[in-house]
Amino acid sequence: MCIFCDIIEKKVPSEIMYENEQVVAFHDIRPKAPVHVLIVPKKHIRSVNDITESDTAAIGALFFAAQTVAEMMGVKDGYKIAFNVERKGGQLIDHVHMHLLAWPGSQEGKKEVAFI
Ligand code: AMP
Ligand code: ZN
């Protein structure tokens, strides 16, 4: 259905670092931060604008998985999560994905990220 569906189905190689019944997490191929992981629902949902009431558990699972991913990456003390929504919001891949970004070496962290 899309490149992320192919990653989820392991038809396209990627660096999957976590998976459960509802989500898959893999390293972004072009990282914008020292830690940049994408967390995606296994269900193909095009955009945040397409989420329906029946998807709320799958979307909640993204946030729940973020804790685990952050823990696994050693950045639970500070990280940023973001969703780009539609082209004008910077969304290039039409499958809902959470960006998890962290700057573990930085003392103050990053308050501003202009564009992911
Ligand atoms: P967005 O602009 O929010 O749609 O983000 C898409 C993200 O997917 C970008 O940060 C890309 O670097 C990343 N990306 C695109 N193709 C792949 C891939 N095959 N494996 C991992 N990350 C990818
Ligand atoms: Zn998809």
Image: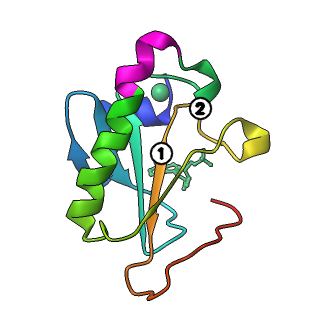
The residue shown at (50%, 29%) is 2
Which quarter of the figure has residue 42?
top left
Tag 2 residue: 94
The residue shown at (73%, 44%) is 89
Tag 1 residue: 98
Q: Does the magenta stretch include residue 57?
A: yes
Q: How far apart are marks 2 and 1 (CA)?
A: 12 Å
In the rendered image, the quadrant that contains the C terminus is bottom right
Mark 2 vs mark 1, foreground winner is 1
Q: Nearer the viewer, residue 56 or 35?
A: 56
- Residue 49: give x, y in percent of width and height: 64, 24
Q: Which of 15 and 103 is in front in this view?
A: 103
Camera sees residue 10: no
Display colour scheme: rainbow
Ligand 2 under 8 Å from disc 2 Cβ: yes
Q: Does the magenta stretch include residue 107?
A: no
